[in-house]
Amino acid sequence: MASRAAGYCYSTRMKRTALLLFWCLLLPACKNAVRSDINLTAPQVQQERRDTVHGKEIWLAIAPLETAAQIGNGNVHAHYFEDGTTILVLQANVSLAPSGETYVAWLRNTSGAIVRLGAVQTVAKDARHHGNFEEKRDLRGYRELLLTLETNAAAETPGLVQATAVLQEPKNRL
């Protein structure tokens, strides 16, 4: 019994020694592989964003979509380009609209003026809705997005608001 325990201790010591030797050889090799020319604290340079049709992006704003009674979620981002075009992209995860009704997106400015963007679509006939809206005018002053449920897809004024988002420019944009 004693020889068995001694053999076990000898085997364990050999494993430990081999592991220690492995680490002693590995660490110096890793030291040579570390690059010293990378500066992780270097400031990032802002890159110019360009669209092939509309040119240079002048302005960007983003926002999470907040739904009434926490029934869904989503996001919205708006872009303004040097040719005077505003593009707004909306992604909303909300329940399917009841039969005969549709979701419509609107923008509202601080003085209460409203711009109708259009109907929001669901291709898969489930909670995933999207809207890609392009306006040939400057809508940077319209920061509040409203998502309403309308019985008339061509409604001229917003109905019951289902979700909202307040567009804000990102602070640290690269």
Image (spheres, rainbow, N blue to C red):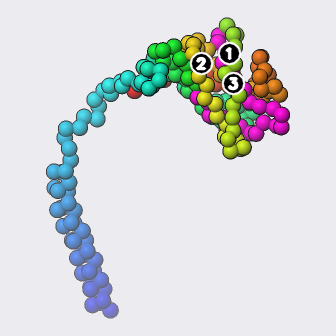
Mark 3 Cα shell of 10 Å, populated few (<14), some (14-19), many (≥20)? some
Q: Are marks 3 and 2 in contact (CB under 8 Å)?
A: no
- Of 24 and 173, the residue lying toward us: 173
Q: Amino acid at mark 2?
A: Glu
> Considering the image in quadrants, where does the C terminus appear?
top left
Left or right: where does residue 68 sit relative to residue 82?
right
Give the distance between the C-alpha atoms of the residues marked 1 and 2, in whole angstroms.
10 Å
Q: Element type at marker 2? A: strand
Give x and y (percent) for residue 5: 31, 86
For residue 1, which quarter of the picture?
bottom left
Identified at 68% across, 44% down, the residue is 124
Q: Amino acid at mark 1?
A: Val
Mark 1 Cα shell of 10 Å, populated few (<14), some (14-19), many (≥20)? some
Q: Are marks 1 and 2 in contact (CB under 8 Å)?
A: yes
For residue 22, which quarter of the picture?
bottom left
Dot label at residue 118: 3
Q: Amino acid at mark 3?
A: Gly
Badge 1 or badge 2: first in the primary sequence: 1
For residue 14, which quarter of the picture?
bottom left
Report which residue position mark 1 lands on. 115
Report which residue position mark 2 lands on. 135
Give x and y (percent) for residue 130: 64, 34
Mark 2 Cα shell of 10 Å, populated few (<14), some (14-19), many (≥20)? few
